[in-house]
Image (cartoon, rainbow, N blue to C red):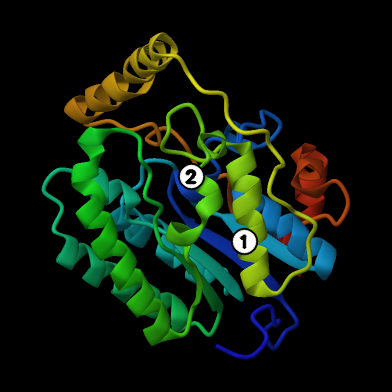
Amino acid sequence: MGSNPLRSDREGRRVFVALGDSFTEGVGDRDERLPNGVRGWADRVAEKLAKAGPGWEYANLAIRSKRLRHVITDQLEPALAMRPTLITLYAGGNDILDIGTDMAALMDEYEDLVARLAGTGATVVLFTGFDVKVSAVLELLKKRNTVYNQRVREISAKYGTVLVDYWCLDAFHDRRMWDSDRLHMSKAGHKYLAGQVLDQLGVPHKIRLKDWDPPARLSLREWEQRQRRWVNDWVLPLFGRKIRGVTLGDALAPRWPEPVKVPRKRGLKKLMDRDSVLKNSPKASGS
């Protein structure tokens, strides 16, 4: 990697492409005005990049529920065709949740993917995973998460990528940083993570950790009610989908499948006007 992680290519282009699953799609940061009804940290980063230096293009190929193999087969080649100068990748979290995952094989595939991305000359941003304490049942997955994070750190160092060490971000120990499913970040979580990514890229911003009062203590009855609601609303449907072999991402398309020019004012919401989307498409403008 060069000294400037946000450098343009020889043609003066600066293209940010985000790859991955629900983490990068933006699940938990609801906004019905945007594709798939979410916003997310990657959109926020793209908007801050545009404010810091006009001319940025942005594509987000991430789709919820996707495994690493889907990122490789469905997202890698389209991303490379966009000739990105900045790439973010988080993938493998859903594989960790799957029964029978071979972590050594998974991380070898992950390294091969990172090698392909780093070989483009683009700045590559990787993430460790967070230790989400949603249930004692999922504590069994902690060893997998530890293996994942250790390999990500090693791979990041080997290929000279930018690393956002999500595992070490203490702010995420506050349950208000998480959505009601306890697996995806809330709006506050996505916003804070965007700030962490921008910090690693050296981009100025004014994102600050939300100044909350200490969380209210729950009575035993309130805690039990929340647990039952979580199991009924999220855990049982999740296992039901696993049994049926379906995922929440099966019917979804990427939110920003082609690079769009990010407006400096009003951000990506401005592009939701159809005429504006066509006008700002690099293909439509001949850029």
Q: Percent position (x, y) of residue 26?
A: 55, 43
Residue 26 relative to residue 261: left or right? left
What residue is disc 2 on? 173
Of 224 and 88, nearer the camera is 224
Which callout, 1 or 2, points at the residue further toward the start of the chain? 2
Question: Mark 1: few, some, or many residues within 10 Å (few <14, many ≥20)?
Answer: many
Above or below, 178 relative to 146: above
Q: Nearer the viewer, residue 177 or 49?
A: 177
At x 36%, y 23%, the residue is 234
Mark 1 vs mark 2: in front: 2
Camera-nearest residue between 274 and 162: 162
Task: Report the residue at 36% width, 13% height from top.
Answer: 224
- Asked if residue 259 shows in the view, the reply is no
Q: Quadrant for residue 55, please give it.
A: bottom right
Task: Tell me the residue at 72%/77% (across/down).
Answer: 13
The relative height of residue 68 versus residue 253 in the rendered view (above or below) is below
- Going by the numbered disc 2, the residue's amino acid type is His
Residue at 69% over, 88% down: 10
Tag on residue 87? Answer: none
What element does badge 2 sit on?
Answer: helix
Q: Are marks 1 and 2 in contact (CB under 8 Å)?
A: no
Neighbor class of circle 2 (other Cα within 10 Å; few <14, some 14-19, many 20+) is few
The residue carrying mark 1 is: 196
**Residue 174 rendering spot, x and y as whole percentages:** 53, 40
Distance from disc 1 to disc 2, alpha carbons, whole Å, reads: 16 Å
